[in-house]
Amino acid sequence: MQAVLIAGALVLIAVGAVIFTLVTPWWFTPQASNWGEIDSTLLLTIWITGIAFVLVNLFVAYTVIRYRHREGQRAEYLPEHKRLEWGLIALTTVGVIVLLAPGLFVYSRFITPPEEAMLVEVVGEQWRWTFRFPGPDGVLGEADPQRISFENPFGIDPDDPYAQDDVLVLGNELHLPVGVPVKLQLRAKDVLHSFYVPQFRVKMDTVPGMVTHLWFTPTEVGRYEIACAEYCGIGHHTMRGVVVVEDEESFRQWLATQPIFGSPAGRSE
Ligand code: CUA
């Protein structure tokens, strides 16, 4: 009786998990970038781990009943079973490769931006996001955390000629033109943060002392929330921002309203 109850509970868990996955409202957000491949790899993971989960539960349920305790019956002691062990090793290896390989392929594409991608710098700090565009020369000026001050929040080298036309965006809001590939170059001023825009399927840690990067093409006009996806202190939950995706013309107009490093407006907050 007990064995049947336990087996029943296991079957219920397996069936319940499948039903939950089919009807859950917590599914992918609508996609607004080119990264459909990221959804494919996630779905592949759900399928493989889901099938394994159901099979393991059903197998345990079966064995609980099939080998339940019976009076006068003793378990067989079988410490070694070479064929079974090699079989399990092979199966697990195939499973790990199938789970890992597609993700590695997509990741290598995710961090290899196309030549023509527009460069934008993202800086994470406790607890806000700031952004920098390289200006007409297309090159960001040298920046060094040592130079960060109230007047120079990005730590930009004031003598670097490439820095003079850099556009500074200090307001947690990043505008991007629709349909244009963007390369984000990310750094952090203080602790670990993570730049995450769910609709773009884009997430990357910002690491103090390191520059990380990724790329994507926004495909839908709209406003998208930036969330910090790495716990970074007491204000972590307030570290939000917005990406506004709009047509090229509106983007140019917005960019023109932002301060330029080499101009008097760019030298203080
Ligand atoms: Cu920044 Cu959490």
Image: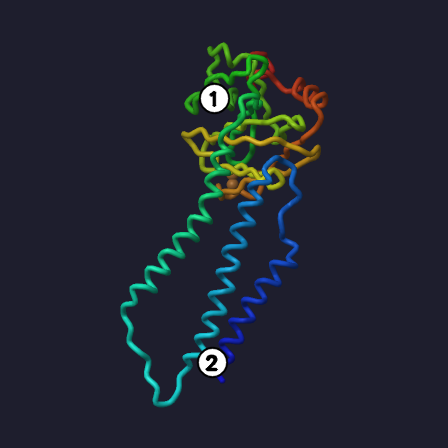
* Near-viewer residue (258 or 152): 258
The residue that disc 2 covers is: 3
* Vertical side of 13 occupied by 3: above or below: below
Q: Secondary structure at mark 1?
A: loop
- Image location (x, y in percent) of residue 148: 46, 23
* Relative depth, front residue between 50 and 190: 50
Against 53, residue 4 (above or below) is below
Q: Which mark is residue 119?
A: none
Total numbered labels = 2
Seen in the picture, residue 212 relative to 198 is either above or below; the reply is above
Crowd tier of the residue under label 2, counting other residues whose Cα lies within 10 Å: few below 14, some 14–19, many 20 or above: some
Is residue 269 visible to us here? Answer: no
Residue at the farthest front position: 83
Return the residue nearer the eye: 2 or 192.
2
Q: Position of residue 174 (x, y in %)?
A: 62, 29
The residue at which mark 1 appears reads as 155
Q: Quadrant of residue 69?
A: bottom left
Q: CA distance from mark 2 to mark 1?
A: 67 Å
Q: Secondary structure at mark 2?
A: helix
Image quadrant for the C terminus?
A: top right
> Residue sitting at 70 percent across and 19 percent down?
253
Mark 2: amino acid: Ala
Q: Label 1 sits on what residue type?
A: Gly
Alpha-carbon neighbours of circle 1 within 10 Å: few (<14), some, or many (≥20)?
some
Residue 157 in view here = yes
Q: Earlier in the sequence, mark 2 or mark 1?
A: 2
User: Would you say the beta carbon of the disc 1 residue lies within 8 angstroms of ligand 1?
Assistant: no
Given this view, does label 2 or label 1 mark the residue nearer the observer?
2
- Residue at 54% x, 27% y is 183
Residue 176 drawn at (x, y percent): 64, 27
